[in-house]
Image (cartoon, rainbow, N blue to C red):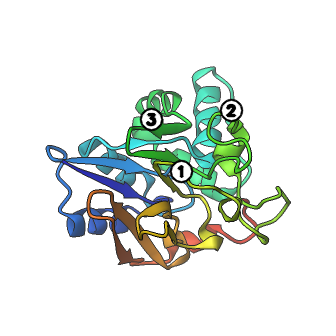
């Protein structure tokens, strides 16, 4: 069995399908894990959902999933969802046929997945307090260190001291693809948000082969939502 990690999808179902095909991903053989932020902003959140279910993918909670879950839970409670940006309304409309199933699935997402070989998080961990001392907000949205507003500055992983396990994360499209190695060449940190929604690439990492695989963005439809939007 292979362990496959894929970075932030943001509704890019066509690229997701292309990457799965390139990887020859098979649910009977491969353990597929996603870094979060799977649905919002992009053109085909429903297509992403269908592939997640077909491949029995596991995922950690992203900041966009946290918001989407609140919106779907509000609907379940008979309240109108709070929508700030057009892409959020679009995502809700596209997921309409499966919203209850998605709501239940989102409610069960963990903030991190840990095995004997790796730790998977969405945004990162507190580089001073480690995994056990990382807050929910940090799991969902940490980027700079020390924490600062905006997207520029030194990253949390610039101060991270590697442990015994590989740490995989997403979230930071402005920071791009990250691959840091130990002196012996073994990777200890992999950041997989390579900005597919911005017209760049969708990235995967095969744990057992220590290998990155990418496909280019096939469209830039998602970019129409990005002006003025938040992270």
Q: Earlier in the sequence, mark 3 or mark 1?
A: 1
Q: Which residue is mark 2?
A: 80
Rounded to the nearest angstrom, the CA distance separating label 2 from label 3 is: 17 Å
The disc label shown at residue 91, or none: 1
Asked whether disc 2 touches disc 1, contact meaning CB atoms under 8 Å apart, the reply is no
Number of residues whose C-alpha sits closer than 10 Å to that of mark 3, classed few (under 14), some (14–19) or many (20 or more): some
Q: Nearer the viewer, residue 208 or 67?
A: 208
Asked which quadrant contains residue 161, the reply is bottom right
**Real-space Cα distance between discs 2 and 1?**
15 Å
Q: Work out which residue is located at the far left of the displayed protein and give it.
A: 28
- Observer-side mark, 2 or 3, equals 3
* SS class, disc 2: loop
Residue 82 visible in image:
no
Q: Is residue 31 above or below residue 18?
A: above
Looking at the rendering, in which quadrant would you find the C terminus? bottom right
Provide the secondary structure element on which disc 3 rests: helix
Q: Is 19 on the left or on the right of 176, as rendered?
A: left
Q: Position of residue 210 (x, y in %)?
A: 33, 65
Which quadrant holds residue 216? bottom left
Q: Which residue is mark 3?
A: 102
The residue sitting at 35% across, 76% down in the picture is 215
Q: x, y (%) of residue 2?
A: 23, 52
Q: Earlier in the sequence, mark 2 or mark 1?
A: 2
């Amino acid at each position: 069995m292979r362990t496959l990690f894929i970075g932030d999808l943001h509704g890019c179902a066509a690229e997701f399908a292309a990457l799965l095909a390139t990887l020859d991903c098979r649910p009977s053989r491969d353990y597929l894990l996603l870094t979060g932020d799977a649905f919002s902003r992009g053109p085909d959140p429903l297509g992403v959902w269908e592939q997640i279910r077909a491949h029995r993918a596991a995922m950690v909670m992203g900041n966009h999933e946290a918001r989407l879950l609140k919106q779907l839970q509000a609907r379940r409670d008979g309240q109108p969802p709070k929508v700030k940006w057009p892409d959020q309304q679009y995502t809700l409309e596209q997921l309409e046929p499966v919203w209850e199933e998605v709501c239940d699935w989102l409610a069960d997402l963990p903030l991190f997945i840990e095995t004997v070989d790796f730790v998977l998080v969405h945004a990162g961990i507190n580089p001073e307090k480690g995994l056990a001392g990382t807050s929910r907000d940090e799991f969902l949205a940490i980027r700079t260190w020390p924490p600062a507003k905006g997207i520029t500055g030194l990253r949390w992983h610039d101060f991270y001291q590697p442990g015994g396990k590989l740490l995989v994360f997403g979230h930071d499209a402005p920071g791009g693809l990250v691959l840091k190695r130990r002196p012996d060449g073994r990777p200890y940190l992999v950041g997989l948000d390579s900005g597919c929604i911005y017209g760049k690439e969708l990235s995967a990492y095969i744990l057992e082969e220590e290998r990155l695989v990418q496909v280019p963005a096939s469209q830039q439809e998602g970019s129409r939502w990005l002006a003025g939007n938040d992270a």
